[in-house]
């Protein structure tokens, strides 16, 4: 099995692995002795887990805590961290093999029904929550073609996505969408579908839960602030926050405060470049006019 090359995912695995090594060392147990108590033939397993060369499972965490005499509270903390590390990375290659709809359910699930607020930054396409059915269908057909997927479940995947859009009307939820102007101008679909999408975008700006649709104009002085990979920052009712980063080979979910803070700073810098309200609508109208030329 291969593991993601993302530095954030590797750093998270390493943080957990380091804690396990320090726990063993603080307990005064050598790697060889730990392996003996664990019933393992070789101590190399200990070494691989503590170097993050092999992912630590929940059973590994319980075993470490049992052998090293950790408190129940410490065990609970490490198990929670292990769960976060395990779900950080979703490989698109693995989930695409199951079809687009399975990928939707595996990577997003009921996320939008659980969050209280979301900040969404997009550099490629209109965010899924704001897509029309026609736009979404053409985009997913393109994904299926590009990924050479055998399973044709585009219609099912579209239905799943469209159902999620009901969350834009959910009381108490707040969504802020930040788009590069290129997202509005690049016509990935037919001109007719793209026109309908831009018109729908202006209508969606009136929804109560859509706090803002902001656009970063092309040609603006960015003051050295470059475009980033598309990402979302989700806030949950209990105050917890996580960032989801869309990479070419998979979806990275970050929960460590330092990682989330990095993306929040990026969001703030990018949002400062954007226009909202009347100016954002003017940009969308300009894009609509260009389709008539």
Image (cartoon, rainbow, N blue to C red):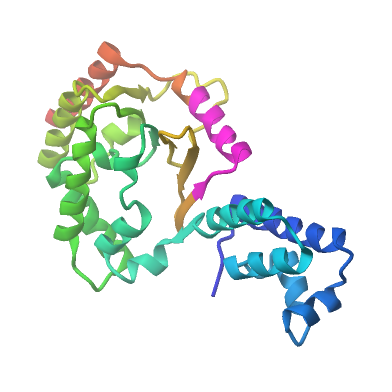
The quadrant in which the N terminus is found is: bottom right
Residue occupying image coordinates x 36% and y 16%? 275
As drawn, is 255 to the left or to the right of 283? right
- Residue 101, quarter of picture: bottom left
Residue 6 visible at all: no
Pinpoint residue 265: horizontal percent, then vertical percent: 56, 28
- Residue 58, quarter of picture: bottom right
As drawn, is 25 to the left or to the right of 102? right
Say which of 58 and 241 sits in front. 58
As drawn, is 111 to the left or to the right of 140? right
Residue 209 visible at all: yes
Say which of 53 and 292 sits in front. 53
1 in relation to 236, above or below: below
Pinpoint residue 45: horizontal percent, then vertical percent: 73, 77
Q: Main secondary structure of the magenta part?
A: helix
Q: Which residues are magenta?
A: 253-269
């Amino acid at each position: 099995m291969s593991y993601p090359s993302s530095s954030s995912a590797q750093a998270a695995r390493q943080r957990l692995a380091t804690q396990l090594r320090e726990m063993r060392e603080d307990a005064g147990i050598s790697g060889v002795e730990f392996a003996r108590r664990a019933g393992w033939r070789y101590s190399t397993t200990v070494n691989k887990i503590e170097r993050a060369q092999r992912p630590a499972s929940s059973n590994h965490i319980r075993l470490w805590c049992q052998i090293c005499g950790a408190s129940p509270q410490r065990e609970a903390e490490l198990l929670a961290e292990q769960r976060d590390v395990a779900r950080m990375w979703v490989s698109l290659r693995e989930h695409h093999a199951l079809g687009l709809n399975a990928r939707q359910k595996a990577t997003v699930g009921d996320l939008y029904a659980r969050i209280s607020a979301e900040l969404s930054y997009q550099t490629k396409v209109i965010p899924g929550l704001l897509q029309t059915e026609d736009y979404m269908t053409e985009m997913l057909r393109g994904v299926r073609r590009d990924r050479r997927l055998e399973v044709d479940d585009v219609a099912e995947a579209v239905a799943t996505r469209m159902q999620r859009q009901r969350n834009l009307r959910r009381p108490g939820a707040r969504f802020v969408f930040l788009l590069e102007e290129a997202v509005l101008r690049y016509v990935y679909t037919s001109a007719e579908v793209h026109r309908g999408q831009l018109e729908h975008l202006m209508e969606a700006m009136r929804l109560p839960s859509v706090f803002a649709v902001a656009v970063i104009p092309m040609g603006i002085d960015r003051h050295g602030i470059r475009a980033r990979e598309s990402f979302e920052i989700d806030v949950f009712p209990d105050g917890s926050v996580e960032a989801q980063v869309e990479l070419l080979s998979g979806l990275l979910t970050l929960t460590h405060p330092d990682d989330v803070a990095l993306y929040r700073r990026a969001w703030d810098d990018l949002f400062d470049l954007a226009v909202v309200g009347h100016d954002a609508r003017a940009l969308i109208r300009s894009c609509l006019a260009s389709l008539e030329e």
